[in-house]
Image: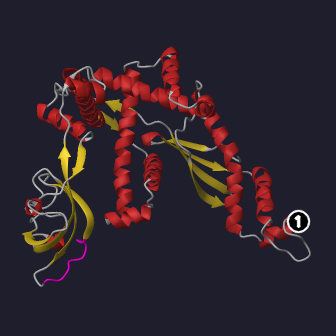
Amino acid sequence: MSDAPIIKRLKAGRVECTVTFTEAEIAPAEEKALHELSRDIEIQGFRKGNAPMDQVKDKVDSDKLFQQTIHHLLPTTFEKLIESDNIKPIIHPRVEAVSQSPLTVKIIFVEKPEVKIKGIDKIKIEKKEPEVDEKEMNKMIDYILAKHKKIIPVEREAKSGDQVTMDFWGSDKEDKEIDGIRTEGHIVEIGSKVLIPGFEDALIGMKKGEEKAFTLTFPEKYHAEQLQNQPVTFHVTVKDIAEINMPELNDEFAQKELQSKDVADFKKQISDSMLQQEITVEHQRRERILMDEIVKCTTVELAEELISEETKQMVGEFSQQLQQQGMTMETWMTQSGKKAEEVMEDMKEQSTTRLKLRLGMQKLIDEKNIDISDEEMDMVIEEFLSQATPEQKVEVESSYKKGAQAYEQLKWQKNVEKALSEMLK
């Protein structure tokens, strides 16, 4: 570098470095760039990539040569700046070309910004005592018993509680068929109230093979707008009628089918399981509130480069989630009616919150001296790897050695869990 780089430490952890290169530094970098670009240059009398560099230089795009030359100068420049000025970047630096002659670039490093936490000790989150609702418990018992029900075909009129298999279609006031209603082999339990009001009641008294037409008005808040509050005549043909026999919950059934000692033991298992779910839900609720409060208590100035990097990562994560569901970002935007700029604005807002939470959590972990010991981490990793197959274990084991990225990410997660747990006591 012809002169010492100009270093400016700015707000939000930004470090601006202006660097001017000497001809001696530029020459080898430019030569490398020319060799790379010459592969696509055709000069009469020479094979691609074998023409003299002075002739290649006349043919090559000057802007491409400039950009490629900078590309070769940067790695060594980054290393020198980081070492000589004790810069500790947390994301990849941003580079701007300032001038071509002399070749000058501006490099923006982003270090961890200053974080302040205020009012964290005043956070009080109400703790609700988890309990099992008896009605919900009875619903769960009914649901489990329903898995053991027996369906017995009958040759009689349908009555409440029966299972009816039917074909039906619907017509409007002018007796024209309505699109989207025709259904074959539809199964319904009379009295389940899954169909619109009046439909299941109209099936009572019908026999196998019987046809019937009846008119019903769709509810005002029906999900299909074109049918809301509209009269529709249904034309039904009953295909089968079956009686539903629910098992009796007694000690013998509990032992034979439910892997329980008796009815009391079965109900206790259900109650314990539901209580554990309630405890988990309550813990997650308090955690969410606590994290929202940590964000409110965190003061930090975020560099635009840091927000941009986090936003890109969030967009990538969301895109990957959509791909796992067999959907592209473009399809999702079309279905949700969102424009690309709206998605990016939403993601930018979320990334800002996520950064504040992460930096606030790190500050709290440091202040509270929370650090999972090596021995605790060994136990965590052992438990984690125990869930993997032998082949998977061999494949990922090295990633969970101390110092590896996966190891550090897992340690961070455990430190966060420990911090939140202490604050929720």
Given residues 203 and 329, the one toward you in this image is 203
Res 42 → quadrant: bottom right
Looking at the image, can residue 101 be seen?
no
Q: Secondary structure at mark 1?
A: loop
In the visual, does 2 lie left or right of 353?
right
Q: Residue 202: x and y, percent?
A: 8, 63
Dot 1 corresponds to which residue? Answer: 50
Does the magenta segment cover residue 14?
no
- Please tell me how crowded label 1 is: few (under 14), some (14-19), or many (20+) other residues with Cα within 10 Å: some
Q: Residue at x 74, y 51 (%)?
A: 22
Given residues 208 and 342, the one toward you in this image is 208
Looking at the image, can residue 345 be seen?
yes
**Which stretch is magenta?**
175-182
What's the residue type where badge 1 is placed?
Asn
Res 342 → quadrant: bottom left
Q: Residue 15: x and y, percent?
A: 52, 42
Image quarter (top left, top right, bottom left or bottom right) of the C terminus: top left
Q: Residue furthest right?
A: 45
In the visual, does 344 lie left or right of 40?
left
Given residues 67 and 165, the one toward you in this image is 165
Q: Residue 408: x and y, percent?
A: 52, 29
Count the marks: how many?
Answer: 1
Given residues 189 and 170, the one toward you in this image is 189
Q: Residue 97: x and y, percent?
A: 60, 58
Q: Residue furthest bottom?
A: 174
What secondary structure do most residues of the magenta stretch adopt? loop
Q: Which color mode does the image show?
A: secondary structure
Q: Residue furthest top?
A: 375
Does the magenta segment cover residue 177?
yes
In the visual, does 81 lie left or right of 69?
left
